[in-house]
Amino acid sequence: TNLLNYHPEQALSHYLRYLNCLHHREFPGALDSLHRYFDYAMVEKWGKDFVQYAIINLAALHHNFGHRGLSLLATDEAVRVAQQNGDGACVAYALAWLHHNGVGAARSSDRPERNRGGDQMLENGLDSGDSDVASAALTSQTEEL
């Protein structure tokens, strides 16, 4: 807290507060700290071309607090922004993260019948490396929420 009082412009101090809020399961503080971290980090070193990483971190935050629908929506947005910025590494990361923590974690017994086709479409897109197919599958699944 003292670090934030004396140097609020230091992005790292906000990230440390974010991690502390995650540890203590304090959603409002974690969300605020994550926003502040990326606000300052983009000014300090990254610029606007890295906004997709802020969004994928937001998706992870929602996932950690059990907000599955918001996590899927944020991941979809991260994929779209990364595609627009030509950041293939972030597209791959976001889709793999989604598969591991989102769609892939919810097996067919946990999901309604109508979503299984979207899961298969997403897996096919991930396996073939076609981010457009995977993104379309993700979009169709988030629209059902």
Image (cartoon, rainbow, N blue to C red):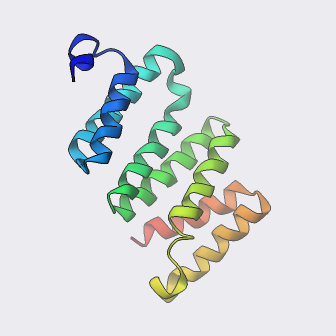
Q: How many marks?
A: 0
Q: Which quadrant: the N terminus?
A: top left
Q: Is residue 29 left or right of residue 88?
A: left
User: What residue sits 44% from the left and 67% below the top?
Assistant: 143
User: What residue sits 79% from the left and 62% below the top?
Assistant: 128
Query: Whole-percent x and y of residue 33?
Result: 30, 33
Examine the image and state in which quarter residue 2 appears.
Answer: top left
Q: Is residue 10 left or right of residue 131?
A: left
Of residue 87 and residue 21, the one placed in the foreground of this image is 21
Query: Whole-percent x and y of residue 137?
Result: 59, 67
User: What residue sits 50% from the left and 65% below the top?
Assistant: 102
User: What residue sits 61% from the left and 58% below the top?
Assistant: 135
Q: Is residue 37 above or below residue 66?
A: above
Query: Whole-percent x and y of residue 18?
Result: 33, 37
Of residue 80 and residue 106, the one placed in the foreground of this image is 106
Of residue 111 and residue 73, the one placed in the foreground of this image is 111
Q: Is residue 10 left or right of residue 91?
A: left
Examine the image and state in which quarter residue 142 appears.
Answer: bottom left
Which residue, as the protein is rendered here, is positioned at the far right? 128
Q: Which quadrant: the C terminus?
A: bottom left
Q: Is residue 17 above or below residue 6?
A: below
Query: Whole-percent x and y of residue 70?
Result: 37, 58
Q: Is residue 28 above or below residue 48?
A: below
